[in-house]
Image (spheres, rainbow, N blue to C red):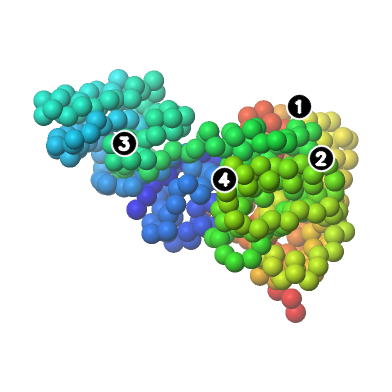
Amino acid sequence: MHITILGRQPALGVAELEQLYGADNVRWFSEQTALVDSPDFDFETLGGSQKAGRVVLELDRGNWLIASRQIVQYYAAKWRTSEHKITLGISAYGFKISPRDVQKTGLLIKKKLRDSGTSLRLIPNPEIALNTATSHHNKLGLSPTKVELLVIRAPNNRLIIAESVGAQNITALAARDQARPRTDAFVGMLPPKLARMMINLSGETKPGRLWDPFCGTGTVLQEARLKGIDVYGSDLSQKMVDYATENMQWLDNKYQINPQWQIFQADATAVKLNTAQKSEINRVVCEAYLGQPFSAPPKPAKLTAVRGNCNHIISQFLANIRPQINPSATLVVAAPAWRDHSGKFTHLPLIDQVADLGYRRLHLNLVSDEQLLYYRQNQVVAREILLLKPLDEN
């Protein structure tokens, strides 16, 4: 059993887990954490979880004092005969305690180990939970001597202690976002971790190809290839095709990976796939046209115009590819939704009309459709994640 510390928008992280491991094997533990019971759990493939840990103790009820006693007793004994220096970080979630309380637990272990001749380096706690950067840079969870204990209490006072299996590799994510040869802020900057989440929302890796018909600079394509998925990418702009090609060549050189890729120029609303493409594509993952960016909510007339234009383009795209893709394919499409000053969202009309375009919404068990929105604070244009399946052909 593993527990994940979810990202800034927890529902998206749980949706990702459900699609990868099945609703029967995933459950919410608290608002910020989820439990996963699967032998195939692989934290490194996730985009929507900041940390994960292997559960070592679960109590029906507990507080920090109980957790601290258990931790000190168990790990002081476990590491007493260690021949190597231990690096330890402790992160607490769901407790009303101070960073000093967390540090005190670590210092008690350190004192007991010092008495037995074992050296321990304790990571300082500015907050009760170490941030992802601290965990990552200290390589916590990546070896038996670099340990992070995740101590989580649910609202019903259930308590879990877990040993970290790692933190999100923010260094690699940043490199794939900013250090690659070509970026273009004008066409939008899809974060690599969101691209990875969207790929995972299309289901587990299986034979076949992923297609991104709005590939831009190739973020979805690169994240898919790192998961071992062969890809097709296309874009209306030849400039974007050239940029994506250059970025994919950079990825080849940096990571020495094998999955096949092909990028071509095409209008998503009119593209005609060839026979090989039709037979190979079993998932479509893309950030569709989001319209112009806004720094403040637009006036009603402007919003109506932009919304209508986006709705037309994305509807044309979905209608065009429907007869060309496999009926069993899964589509994960990021479409725009606009947030007003009150926090209310305006959605595309097509959201309620996908059946007219030949599709059905894929509904999840643990997360509602309304929760599948990705946005940052004060961001006007959000990405609404649509999970679609073609309607059965009669």
Residue underneath mark 2:
291
- Dot 4: what SS? helix
Q: Residue at image x 47%, y 46%? A: 44
Q: Amino acid at mark 3?
A: Val
The disc label shown at residue 147, or none: 3
Q: Nearer the viewer, mark 2 or mark 4?
A: 4
Residue underneath mark 1:
295
Quadrant that contains the C terminus: bottom right
- Dot 2: what SS? loop
Counting residues from the start of the chain, the first of labels 2 and 3 encountered is 3
Tag 4 and tag 3, C-beta contact below 8 Å: no
Residue underneath mark 4:
255
Image check: 240 left or right of 18? Answer: right
Q: Amino acid at mark 4?
A: Tyr
- Dot 3: what SS? strand
Q: Label 2 vs label 4: CA separation?
A: 33 Å
Q: Amino acid at mark 1?
A: Ser
Q: Nearer the viewer, mark 2 or mark 3?
A: 3
- Residue, far bottom: 394
Compared to residue 62, the image places residue 104 above or below, namely above
For the residue carrying disc 1, how many other residues have a C-alpha within 10 Å: few (<14), some (14-19), or many (20+)?
few
Residue 239, can we see it?
A: yes
Compared to residue 126, the image places residue 286 above or below, namely below
x, y percent for residue 41: 42, 54
Out of 34 and 356, give the one closest to the viewer: 34
